[in-house]
Image (spheres, grey):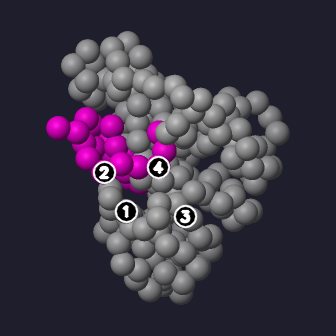
Amino acid sequence: MPLQNRVLATGEIVAHPARGLFMGNRGILHDDCQRLGRARWRHKAWVTCRLEWKGVRRPLMTPHNYTELFFLDEVVALAAGHRPCAYCRRADYNSYLAAIGHDGPVKALDDRLHYERAVPRAFAQKRHAARVEDLPPGAVILDGVPKLVTEKRLRPIAPYGYDAPEPRPQKGLVTLLTPPTSVQALRNGYAPQMHPTAR
């Protein structure tokens, strides 16, 4: 039975057997029986990490250690409010910082992202209104289900991958899941790594 450790673009953490391309963490969210409590984060440094790093292997959801979370791909991780890890993904982290013009302390970046992505005390995802014509490829909107924005299409996102493309509306208001800081990164050339089904 799969553990509850798969993060969706909506910020929900569900149990799903499909494998993703990235791991991440938000602190210790599970108990000694590998069950999640009500909290969906314990700190503001939400990172997205490589699945493989220097041969390190970890048993999942070890008591009193951080909860390993998994994402379909980096598009989903960004939409859920995560950023690249500065340790195992240093080049991507530097590219992300350059794309948003951030040269201050990382705590300031994490505070900024947390303000954009989280509803405090409700452990819920903050969403934003945006004009679809202004969104760069790689952003994710909520239109019944989460959908990846591409140049000409929308791609519904499921836990196992991307579904068939739909036409992208030419204009209008939409509900944006990707935090504005990450939208800025996408607009300025940050290229998130995508699941093969996105192609």
* Image height of 76 relative to 22, above or below: below
* Image height of 37 relative to 180, above or below: above
Q: Within 10 Å of the Cα at label 3, are there few (<14), some (14-19), or many (20+) other Cα atoms?
A: many
Disc 4, disc 2: CB below 8 Å? Answer: no
* Image height of 1 relative to 79, above or below: above
Q: Does the magenta stretch include residue 14?
A: yes
Residue 167 relative to residue 12: left or right = right
Which residue is the site of mark 1?
A: 161
Amino acid tagged 1: Gly
Q: Where is residue 119 in the image (x, y as percent from the top left)?
A: 44, 40
Residue 60 visible to an observer of this rendering? yes
- The front one of 147 and 64 is 64
Q: Where is residue 122 in the image (x, y as percent from the top left)?
A: 35, 36
Check disc 4 and report its element: helix, strand or loop.
loop
Disc 2, disc 3: CB below 8 Å? Answer: no
Which residue is the site of mark 2?
A: 18
Mark 1 and mark 4: Cα distance apart in space: 11 Å
Amino acid tagged 2: Ala
Residue 96 relative to residue 179: left or right = right
Amino acid tagged 4: Leu
Q: Is residue 183 magenta?
A: no
Q: Where is residue 64 in the image (x, y as percent from the top left)?
A: 38, 12
- Residue at image position (31%, 69%) is 144
Which residue is the site of mark 3?
A: 139
Q: Earlier in the sequence, mark 1 or mark 3?
A: 3
Residue 21 badge: 4
Disc 2, disc 1: CB below 8 Å? Answer: yes
Where are the magenta residues, as a range?
Answer: 1-23
Amino acid tagged 3: Ala
